[in-house]
Amino acid sequence: MCSLLPQAPIGTLPNRRKWSPFIPALTPEIAHEAVELIRALYVIEKQASGLALEQRLQLRQTHSAPVLAQLREKFWTWKE
């Protein structure tokens, strides 16, 4: 380990303050919803794996972009 990096005690979260506003908002329902949207992206990527570059781009623009937009909107909603 580099000696120039600050040493944190074992078991502490040095960046906990950055995440503390989100911790109360994390519920199993939100996590499940997020995982389902991310899973949909993985399904689309699996479909794209055997396609040519132009076909992959088209598939991502038509199928992945709406899922990403929905996920982005959900993140903003969950943040509030």
Image (cartoon, rainbow, N blue to C red):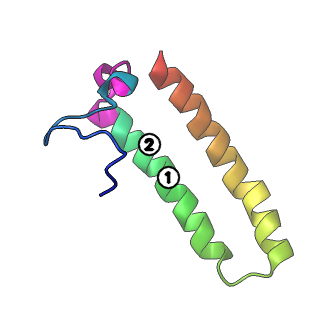
User: Could you say which quadrant of the image residue 55 lies in?
Assistant: bottom right
- Circles 2 and 1, Cβ within 8 Å, touching? The answer is yes
At horizontal 80% and vertical 66% (from top left) the residue drawn is 57
Q: Position of residue 35 (x, y in %)?
A: 41, 49
Q: Residues within 10 Å of mark 2 (few under 14, many from 20)?
A: some
| 22 within the magenta span | yes
At horizontal 57% and vertical 58% (from top left) the residue drawn is 41
Left or right relative to 58: residue 44? left
The residue range painted magenta reads: 19-29
Residue 38 vertical placement versus 74 (above, below): below
* Quadrant occupied by the N terminus: bottom left
Instruction: Identify the residue at the far bottom of this view.
Output: 50
At horizontal 80% and vertical 82% (from top left) the residue drawn is 52
Residue 72 vertical placement versus 55 (above, below): above
Amino acid type of disc 1?
Answer: Ile
Q: Residue under label 2, please give it.
A: 34
Instruction: Identify the residue at the far top of this view.
Output: 80
Residue 80 vertical placement versus 36 (above, below): above
Q: Residues within 10 Å of mark 1 (few under 14, many from 20)?
A: some
| 25 within the magenta span | yes
Left or right relative to 13: residue 56? right
Q: Residue 24 or 20: which is nearer the viewer?
A: 20
Instruction: Identify the residue at the far left of this view.
Output: 10
Residue 38: image tag = 1
Left or right relative to 53: residue 68? left
User: Could you say which quadrant of the image residue 64 lies in?
Assistant: bottom right
Amino acid type of disc 2?
Answer: Ala
Residue 54 vertical placement versus 8 (above, below): below
Residue 75: image tag = none
In the structure shown, which secondary structural element does the residue marked by tag 1 occupy?
helix
In the structure shown, which secondary structural element does the residue marked by tag 2 occupy?
helix
